Image: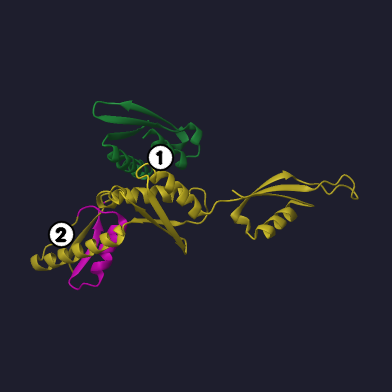
């Protein structure tokens, strides 16, 4: 899942070298913390969070296959 | 990625030669000047101009490459077909788990389409519209929405009361507006702000 979030974020931003994803395991779910360059924040969030929502939707689809609940947080 | 180096008397001349050789136009390539070149004095001390030309990947190449890499995380075994017509790139995903790729009401398909469109048009001057489909979902959904529109329109005419539909994406609202345009006795409009914009069907 980390690789997936990284893959999408790197394709969207201007500074792919500053993309990092950290995984925090919870009891029932996995939290993926996505960090990008401050200048790239808009590129992964989008107007009214539209891009963030699309990233979450795709990650959810990939996670469903593995039967896990995954939360993507942008920090 | 195709790369070509050229030497000529001037930078402009070198660019022209490179483009002739590639049979491409200036906006299909990126040019890096390696040596400016110098005419010198009476032919002495003259230096050739040297450039490097890099052929930019075409939008459909960017789109397919990104989508293939993305879909791999959801379904290992997919085939992707695409065709480009008048700036519209149609992509068809074929796979065992098409249901997961489509998602509820096509939400995953829409997300894949939106992200691919962003990546494709990120660095390009011309906008390429990206449309992604799997298992003919788009057409089926269009038919479903048209049927829904007709059913609600009849209900509005019977009860003489307006009916508000649930929020929908612009492309889905467009299907309903279009379907009811030719139906006498009812009219449609959209209210609210994205992403909660919804259609109201009323007498008219």
Task: Report x, y in % for residue B180.
Answer: 23, 68
In magenta segment, residue B191: yes
Query: Is residue B96 toward the left or the right of residue B164 in the image?
Result: right
Residue underneath mark 1: A44
Q: How far across and how far down the image is residue B21, in percent? A: 69, 58
Report in which chain the residue with disc 1 lies: A
Say which chain is yellow: B
Question: What crowding class fits label 1: few (fewer than 14 Cα within 10 Å), some (14-19), or many (20 or more)?
Answer: many
Q: Is residue A16 above or below residue B49?
A: above
Whether residue B194 is visible here, answered yes or no, is no
Tell which chain the image draws in green: A
Residue B147, by quadrant, is bottom left
- Label 2's element? strand
Name the residue located 47 percent from the left edge and 36 percent from the top edge.
A39
Q: Residue at x 77, y 52 (%)?
A: B10
Q: Are discs 2 and 1 located on one and the same chain?
A: no
Instruction: Give neighbour class at mark 2: few <14, some 14-19, many 20+ (Cα, 10 Å).
Output: some
Which element is circle 1 on? helix
Q: Quadrant of the C terminus of chain A?
A: top left
- In this orientation, which residue lies closer to the viewer: A56 or A38? A56
Q: Nearer the viewer, residue B167 or B101?
A: B101
Q: Residue at x 29, y 54 (%)?
A: B169
Start-end of magenta stretch: B166-192
- Where residue B36 appears, as percent x and y from the top left, is 75, 45
B32 relative to B85 in the view: left or right:
right
Q: Is residue B112 visible to us here? A: yes
Residue at 43% from the left image edge and 39% from the top image edge: A7
Number of numbered discs: 2
Q: Which residue is mark 2?
A: B163
Q: Nearer the viewer, mark 2 or mark 1?
A: 1
Q: Nearer the viewer, residue A15 or B182?
A: A15
Q: Position of residue B189 (x, y in %)?
A: 24, 61
């Amino acid at each position: 899942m980390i690789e997936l979030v990284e893959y999408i974020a790197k394709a969207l931003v201007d500074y792919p070298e500053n993309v990092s994803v950290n995984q925090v395991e919870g009891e029932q779910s996995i939290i993926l913390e996505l960090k990008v360059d401050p200048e790239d924040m808009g590129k992964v969030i989008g107007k009214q969070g539209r891009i963030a929502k699309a990233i979450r939707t795709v990650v959810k689809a990939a996670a469903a296959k593995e039967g896990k609940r995954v939360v993507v947080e942008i920090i | 990625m195709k790369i070509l180096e050229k030497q000529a008397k001037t930078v402009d001349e070198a660019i022209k030669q490179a483009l002739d050789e590639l049979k491409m136009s200036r906006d299909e390539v990126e040019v890096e000047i390696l040596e400016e070149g110098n005419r010198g004095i009476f032919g002495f001390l003259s230096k050739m101009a040297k450039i490097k030309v890099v052929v930019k990947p075409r939008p459909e190449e960017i789109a397919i490459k990104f989508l293939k890499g993305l879909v791999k995380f959801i379904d290992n075994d997919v085939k992707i077909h695409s065709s480009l017509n008048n700036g519209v790139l149609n992509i068809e995903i074929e796979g065992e788990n098409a249901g997961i790729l489509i998602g509820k009401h096509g939400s995953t398909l829409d997300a894949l389409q939106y992200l691919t469109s962003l990546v494709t048009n990120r660095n390009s001057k011309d906008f390429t519209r990206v449309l992604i489909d799997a298992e003919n979902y788009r057409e089926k959904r269009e038919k479903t929405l048209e049927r829904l529109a007709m059913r609600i329109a009849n209900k509005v005419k019977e009860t003489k009361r307006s009916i508000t539909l649930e929020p929908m994406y612009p492309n889905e609202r467009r299907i309903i507006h279009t379907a009811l345009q030719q139906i006498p006795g009812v009219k449609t409009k959209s209210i609210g702000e994205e992403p909660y914009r919804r259609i109201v069907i009323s007498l008219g």
